[in-house]
Image: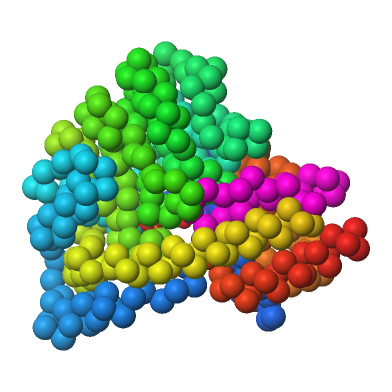
Amino acid sequence: MNDSKSLRSRISKVVQDIPRSGIRDFFEIVSSREDVISLGIGEPDFVTPWHIREAASLALDRGVTSYTSNMGLLSLRRGIAQYIQKKTGVEYNPVDEVLVTVGVSEGLDIAIRALIEPGDEVLYHEPSYVSYNPLIRFAYGVPVAIQTKKENGFRLTRQDLEENVTEKSKVLLLNYPNNPTGAALSRKDVEDIAAFAIEHDLIVLTDEIYDELTYDREHFSIISVPGMRERTIYLHGFSKAWAMTGFRMGFTCAPPELTEAMMKIHQYTMLCAPILSQEASIEALKNADADIAYMKAEYKKRRNYIHASFEEMGIPCVRPDGAFYAFADISQFGMTSKEFALRLLDEQNVACVPGTAFGACGEGFIRCSYAAAFDDIKEAMVRVARFIEKL
Ligand code: PLP
């Protein structure tokens, strides 16, 4: 009775229908092999700055090992509100408008679940971060993927939105600077999208986890546009700019009604974010400006290098404005993205992610993370050049 086929048939249809993340599949192949240079994972090669690690160790030494309030430590929420105010000019009340989550991953999940009823449509742009489509489906929502185009630098335009909005559209999910394309938006782009959201009465979820990492222009958040704070859940976290992936720390900022709705889900599923990570994040907000500036300058060098290398090889690649990914167009080689990535791995020991992991319109592209060490990136580019020469 309990054979594996029968157990599989008991699994919820929604879960059965959702494939594993294409990134994870590649990651597992890579970790089973030696001498592979990985440009696959979107994770800083930097260790978390020492003073942030020390804050966690000292808290542990003091015996700080308890639960916190469901919302998170008030001192951390105050720090978050100050940080956001400084960055965007927008004020949030740390008491009932800031919620500390287990990474932006959890923030996304509870934001979507708090809003979506079965059949509600969520507009989002593709190529996109791998979790958006599954999270919408786990919540019985309908994902409406809007294809962004290389010709527009993968920026979402008002026209793209107009073509996809329907009576059932409830939420617009944005991610700029973008994973996987590296695209960032101008102030005008953001204002146009905001006007659209207001006109169509949409709630906006804005995943700004890469907001610190823009290289050619200042990031402008949609919450700074008048009329948007009221209809937006702002999502951010410490994984990327602070190199704190393993701490699993994120947060949401939103009006009290939406925060309370998300808090209910968070309270029953997570209870609270880990206290040591919260202690570390208090320190991160206070004293890490120089660390962020240093890492960002390094990423910028790597960005310039990887972009120039692809262009020299005759592989078109929109110059990434933000995050730490290059999305290179390999369509000229007559292979699918997956074939290209697998052969590159097999023949040259370089791992990247096929563009299709980020949606069907990623076909013809590969994503290379330049959060890897500079020397690794250099060697990887030599190997890619060798690989395409032989094709
Ligand atoms: N959102 C985007 C766009 C990401 O790229 C990632 C991680 O790669 C996440 C969210 C998840 O981040 P976290 O580590 O905070 O859960």
Indicate the quadrant where residue 28 lies: bottom right
Residue 194 lies in magenta, yes or no? no
Q: Residue at x 16, y 52 (%)?
A: 82
Quarter of the figure that contains the N terminus: bottom right
Ligand 1 quarter of the rendering: bottom left
- Magenta stretch? 314-336
Quarter of the figure that contains the C terminus: bottom right
The location of residue 147, given as percent across then percent down, is 59, 31
Q: Residue at x 42, y 24 (%)?
A: 192
Looking at the image, is 39 positioned above or below residue 362? below
Q: Residue at x 77, y 57 (%)?
A: 312
Q: In this view, does 191 lie to the left or right of 75?
A: right
Q: Which residue is drawn at 53% across and 35% down?
A: 155
Looking at the image, is 384 positioned above or below residue 322? below
Q: In this view, does 53 lie to the left or right of 132?
A: left
Q: In this view, does 276 lie to the left or right of 196?
A: left
Is 165 or 389 nearer to us in this picture?
A: 389
Image mark count = 0
In the image, farthest residue toward the front:
216
Is 177 or 238 nearer to us in this picture?
A: 177
Looking at the image, is 109 positioned above or below residue 379? above
Can residue 18 be seen by looking at this rendering?
no
Chief secondary structure of the magenta portion: loop
Residue 323 lies in magenta, yes or no? yes
